[in-house]
């Protein structure tokens, strides 16, 4: 009886310990015009039971198997971070996330597709000891349309041009008399 209880506890703890969570499906809405936002939902095979919560940020990583053709062997599997997802819906065993941030490739290895794909690993972001869990619930990021993005950029440029001080010209302005 004790061994059966120990085996049951061990098997349930191995599931949470292995942290083998992945994106298993991607769905996207079909906007009918430019003013409608585009949503991409990434479905993850982990949920409340594994500690996921709505508003939490999770990191997405891609495993890439390397092959050394000179020595005819596989040296190691490369794990490359892709970006962050914000969880918008969480159930006991399934979560849905949306793009929060895609990492720039400047200081990271290059990927064939610099976006989230089915099969990518999902990892809970953990801060240093004693810190709060990383949550994005206080952010109010909402998807925006292309038209809204263009308007925001134009407004930002206009504000920037108003903030810059007017520079005096090198030559003095001399008015010439008009002949009538």
Image (cartoon, rainbow, N blue to C red):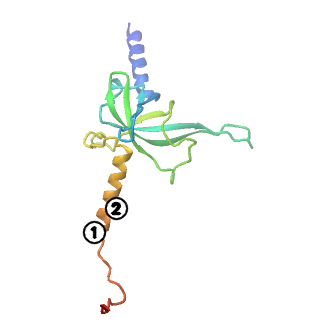
Label 2 secondary element: helix
- Residue 11 percent across, percent down from the top left: 43, 18
Quarter holding the C terminus? Answer: bottom left
Residue on which disc 2 sits: 157
| Residue at image point 37% right, 21% down | 93
- Residue 165 percent across, percent down from the top left: 29, 75
Quarter holding the N terminus? Answer: top left
Residue on which disc 1 sits: 163
Q: Outermost residue toward the front?
A: 180
Question: 22 or 98: nearer the eye?
Answer: 98
Q: Say above or below: 177 vs 142.
A: below
| Residue at image point 30% right, 36% down | 55
Q: Say above or below: 179 vs 1.
A: below
- Residue 151 percent across, percent down from the top left: 33, 52
Label 2 crowding class (10 Å Cα cut-off): few <14, some 14-19, many 20+? few
Question: 9 or 136: nearer the eye?
Answer: 136
Label 1 secondary element: helix
Report whether 30 appears left or right of 159: right
| Residue at image point 29% right, 39% down | 133
Question: 10 or 158: nearer the eye?
Answer: 158
Q: Say if residue 119 shows up in the picture.
A: yes
| Residue at image point 44% right, 33% down | 122
Q: Say above or below: 171 vs 92.
A: below
- Residue 24 percent across, percent down from the top left: 47, 26
Q: Say if residue 20 shows up in the picture.
A: no
Q: Which is more N-terminal, label 2 or label 1?
A: 2
Question: 72 or 162: nearer the eye?
Answer: 162
Label 1 crowding class (10 Å Cα cut-off): few <14, some 14-19, many 20+? few
Q: Quadrant of residue 91?
A: top left
How far apart are the alpha carbons under marks 1 and 2? 10 Å
Q: Quadrant of residue 163?
A: bottom left
């Amino acid at each position: 009886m004790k061994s059966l209880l120990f085996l049951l506890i061990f098997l349930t703890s191995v599931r949470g310990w292995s942290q083998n969570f992945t994106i298993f499906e991607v769905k996207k809405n079909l906007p009918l015009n430019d003013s409608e936002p585009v949503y991409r939902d990434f479905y993850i095979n982990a949920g409340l039971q594994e500690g996921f919560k709505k508003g939490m940020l999770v990191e997405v990583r891609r495993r890439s198997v390397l092959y050394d053709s000179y020595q005819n062997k596989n040296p190691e599997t490369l794990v490359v971070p892709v970006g962050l997802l914000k969880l918008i819906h969480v159930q006991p065993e399934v979560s849905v996330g949306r793009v929060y941030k895609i990492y720039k490739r400047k200081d990271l290895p290059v990927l064939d597709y610099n976006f989230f794909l089915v099969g990518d690993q999902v990892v809970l972001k953990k801060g240093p000891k004693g810190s709060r869990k990383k949550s994005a619930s206080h952010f109010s990021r909402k998807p925006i349309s292309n038209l809204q993005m263009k308007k925001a950029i134009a407004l930002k440029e206009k504000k920037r041009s108003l903030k810059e001080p007017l520079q005096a010209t090198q030559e003095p302005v001399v008015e010439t008399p008009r002949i009538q």
